[in-house]
Image: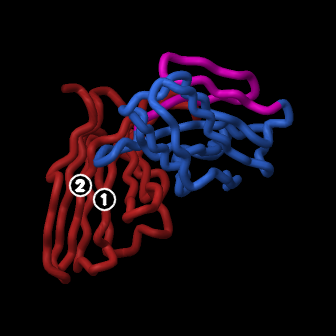
Chain colours: A blue, B red
Amino acid sequence: DAKTTQPNSMESNEEEPVHLPCNHSTISGTDYIHWYRQLPSQGPEYVIHGLTSNVNNRMASLAIAEDRKSSTLILHRATLRDAAVYYCILRDVGLDYKLSFGAGTTVTVRA
Amino acid sequence: DTGVSQDPRHKITKRGQNVTFRCDPISEHNRLYWYRQTLGQGPEFLTYFQNEAQLEKSRLLSDRFSAERPKGSFSTLEIQRTEQGDSAMYLCASSTDRGFTDTQYFGPGTRLTVL
C-alpha cells in the first residue's frame, strides 16, 4: 500500500480556514486520494476524494498538487463540530476495496 | 435512522470467553467491511464481504476470529477465547458497488473490553 504522511495535530480558531496537508510521494497513477474524519466517539465519515483535479463539496475542498505527491484538505470555515481526527488515505482503483488508515491529524478548534 | 447499526455498543467480557458482534448495514448496500481500532490509532481492516461472499481477510484475523454474512444482509463477527489484546473498538462499514471510489458508511462501533 502506498503510504501517506500527515502532521500529528493542528489547531485552528473557529470560523477560520484550516489547511490539512498530506504527503504521498509514492502515489501511483491509479491511486485515488480519499479523506475521512472521525469525530469523538463516532465511526469515521467520508469527507471527499479525488484523483487529479481539485474537488469541492459542501464539507470541504481538496487541492491536489500537479505531480500528485501531496494534497491539502481545506475546511473553509472551521466550526467546533469540525474538531476530529482527519485521515488521508490512498486507494488503488484496481486493487483496494479496503481503506488503509494511518494515525491521521487531530484537529482542535478554538472558540 | 437508516445508517449502519451495530450491537452491542459496549461489551465487557472475561479472558477466554467467546463474544459475538452484529452489524446491520444500510439497506441494499452489498459491500460490508469490518475494522478494528485501538486507542490512538486509525482503524485497521479485518475483512470484507461482497454480498454473502467473504472476499478478503486481513492477517490480523487470526483463527480465533470468524465473520459471516448470511444471505448478504447483516453480518456477525465472533471472537473465540478472547484475549486482553482483543480489547478494541470494532467498526463495521457498508457501501454500494460503485467500483473503488465507493463511499464507506461506518457504524458507531462496538467497544470490547477483555478483563
Q: Which residue is mark 2?
A: B110
Residue A23 is situated, as x and y percent measured from the top left of the image, at 72, 47
**Contact? badges 2 and 1 (CB < 8 Å):** yes
B98, above or below B68, in the image:
above
**Nearer to me, A94 or A15:** A15
Magenta stretch: includes residue B17: no
- Give the magenta-colored segment's residue range: A45-65
**Nearer to me, B103 or A94:** B103
Report the residue at 46% width, 61% height from top.
B41
Q: Quadrant of residue B26?
A: top left
Disc 1 is attached to a residue of which chain?
Answer: B
Question: Which quadrant would the C terminus of chain A be assigned to in this image?
Answer: top left
Report the residue at 57% width, 27% height from top.
A17
Q: Amino acid at mark 2?
A: Thr
**Nearer to me, A84 or A51:** A84
Callout 1: helix, strand or loop?
Answer: strand
Say left or right for A20 vs A68.
left
Question: Which quadrant would the N terminus of chain A be assigned to in this image?
Answer: bottom right
Residue B105 is situated, as x and y percent measured from the top left of the image, at 38, 35
